[in-house]
Amino acid sequence: MTLKDQIKASLAKKRYNFGHLAELSGIDRGSISRILGGHRTCTARSARDLAAAARELTGLPYLSFHFLNNVSIED
């Protein structure tokens, strides 16, 4: 499962979506889509902010590492 699919599924379980992730992380939705789709690299700051927002919304242990390397938790 890709990181994008994993985050999408884990957000959906809590009735959240990428819009909520964007709002909480302070990163626009288009940038998140490009980062998770592998079309844009993630800065350390963006990775930190995305990981913190994903942890808060999903309760799963996302780290900056996952966003910097575009790997899911189970990889």
Image (cartoon, rainbow, N blue to C red):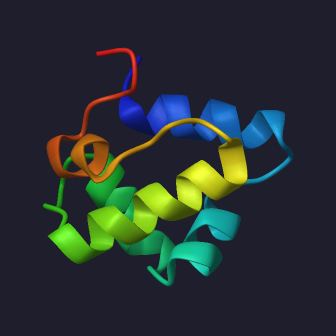
**Up-down relation of residue 55 to residue 6 (above or below):** below
Closer to the camera in the image, 56 or 8: 56
Residue 11: x, y in percent? 70, 43
Image quarter in which the N terminus is found: top left
Q: Residue at x 83, y 42 (%)?
A: 14
Quarter of the image for residue 69 reads top left
**Up-down relation of residue 8 to residue 32 (above or below):** above
Residue 38: x, y in percent? 20, 47
**Drawn side of residue 18 relative to residue 41, left or right:** right
Q: Residue at x 30, y 72 (%)?
A: 46
The residue positioned farthest toward the right in the image shown: 15
Quarter of the image for residue 60 reads top right
**Drawn side of residue 54 relative to residue 42, left or right:** right
Closer to the camera in the image, 58 or 27: 58
Residue 20: x, y in percent? 70, 67
Image quarter in which the C terminus is found: top left
Q: Which residue is drawn at 44% across and 79% down?
A: 27
Q: Residue at x 30, y 60 (%)?
A: 34
**Drawn side of residue 55 relative to residue 45, left or right:** right
Across the whole image, how many numbered discs are drawn on residues?
Answer: 0
**Drawn side of residue 37 relative to residue 12, left or right:** left
Residue 22: x, y in percent? 56, 72
